[in-house]
Amino acid sequence: MLSKSKTTELRKLLQKKYREETGLFIVEGGKSVDELLRSSLTVKGIWATDTWLSAHPQLSVAAEAVTEVELARISALTTPQQVLAVACAPRYAVADFDTSAGAILLDGIRDPGNLGTIIRTADWFGFRQVVCSTDCVEFTNPKVIQATMGSFARVAVFYADLPTFLRGSTARVFGTFLQGRPIEEVTFRRDDLLVIGNEGRGITEPVARCVTDQVHIPSYGGTGDHAESLNASVAAAVAMYAIRRQML
Amino acid sequence: MLSKSKTTELRKLLQKKYREETGLFIVEGGKSVDELLRSSLTVKGIWATDTWLSAHPQLSVAAEAVTEVELARISALTTPQQVLAVACAPRYAVADFDTSAGAILLDGIRDPGNLGTIIRTADWFGFRQVVCSTDCVEFTNPKVIQATMGSFARVAVFYADLPTFLRGSTARVFGTFLQGRPIEEVTFRRDDLLVIGNEGRGITEPVARCVTDQVHIPSYGGTGDHAESLNASVAAAVAMYAIRRQML
């Protein structure tokens, strides 16, 4: 039985303000919570149905049984999924950025689904670092966490003022634009940085000035009428694939 | 001034049932409506703010001025965007499928954002045909239309029972799986078909039996722990890029 005060407390974590105040965030769904439990992140509590709890008899963290109705009250999902966990949000300091490993840089990604999908794709293609501009959606947003499908626990997501970050870097900085060299013609190195722009306006002027190499994803769509651009998470994915593929 | 009965009538089009009954669908936002007006689709009416209307003095379709408050009442968007149009939904019959042009086949794509993004990406990479299984989300769903960013007007979206459709086809059928040949090792032809599976369960058994060639998108993520899979629209995009790139 979930108390009224606990319900209120957990519901507050759906708001960015309270997540920032407490340093906590919410992870929902069987797959994501399993990944959370396997990670090094600190789990503060679990609220789950009896079904989920009986499938997880060896839990080392405090867990409370709740009904599906109670779960619906604290969930950010339209269809709550058996389990909700609260964990301490990882803090990645720019000082800990691994300059030898390269990274995907995001300039103003506002859509939670796009950010989550980009983190998931980065994880798939072995990019362990994502650097977000400070106006990107916060990665502890429940919709971001949901879209990462568990990859939130494996990719370091930094937040930084991108021009400042880039001026302190000696790496090559690639940026995806609607013009530039076709991405498959570039020879990438492990420590390269790749910037993906905002959904609507692309890469901002201050960041564009730090880009050393403009690249684009050819449309091959012929000379006819075709889509003006790609979705940001799609552009990021195609670029990551193109980079990894030529590193084979 | 938008009448109450017109508001009710337009709001009904937010429901699949009424879209199917009337054969109409809603297009919102400046870019999407501009693409609609340039297309061959029949536009039944436009409801727009004075700002939008004064920027479009040469309209050849009936347009009514509405306030932003009125627009919010008929809009499917959280932030309505100056203009909403109602148009006749195109009907693509399987008999009109161009077997020489190839296609992207979608087996149970449920998420409107994914379907819209796949249509947009197909348009970018010059795939003019998408074939949806009958349990895919309907492409006149406002969220699908929104995510296509205007590409809904340029890509033919068919609905068919995929096993039946595939048994009637002589083309090679590629399917994306978590195993199979790395997609960059395949030599594609213009008339090939490519199947993308559902977000959670992948390609269904009856469709899998029609697949002639299993392919996968290598993760290059090393042997360590990494994401189990890619988002469906990301997998579709990487596959389309890989196909077009080797056709250069």
Image (cartoon, coloured by chain):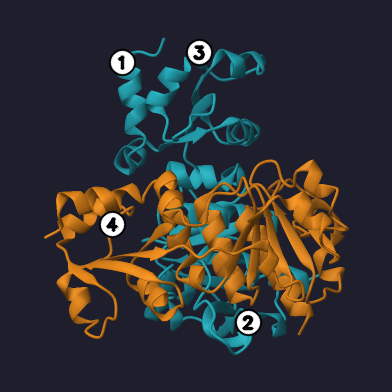
Chain colours: A orange, B cyan
Left/right of residue A45 with respect to residue B41 in the rendered view? left
Q: The residue under label 3 is which amino acid type? A: Ala
Q: CA distance from mark 3 to mark 1?
A: 15 Å
- The subunit letter for the residue under badge 2 reads B
Q: CA distance from mark 2 to mark 4?
A: 32 Å
Q: The residue under label 1 is which amino acid type? A: Lys
Asked if badge 3 and badge 2 are on a common chain, one would say: yes
- The subunit letter for the residue under badge 3 reads B
Contact, mark 1 vs mark 2 (Cβ under 8 Å): no
Q: Residues within 10 Å of mark 2 (few under 14, many from 20)?
A: some
Q: CA distance from mark 4 to mark 3?
A: 38 Å
The disc, 3 or 2, on the residue closer to the chain's N-terminal end is 3
The disc, 3 or 1, on the residue closer to the chain's N-terminal end is 1
Asked if badge 3 and badge 1 are on a common chain, one would say: yes
Q: Position of residue A170 (x, y in %)?
A: 86, 65
For disc 3, the marked residue is B65
Left/right of residue A1 with respect to residue B54 in the rendered view? left
Left/right of residue B247 with respect to residue A79 in the rendered view? right
Identify the element where label 1 is drawn: helix
Identify the element where label 4 is drawn: loop
Which residue is drawn at the image coordinates 65% and 18% (left, top)? B56
Contact, mark 3 vs mark 2 (Cβ under 8 Å): no
Looking at the image, is B239 positioned above or below residue A169? below
Q: Residues within 10 Å of mark 3 (few under 14, many from 20)?
A: some
Q: Nearer the viewer, residue A245 or A64?
A: A64
Looking at the image, is B142 positioned above or below residue B164? above
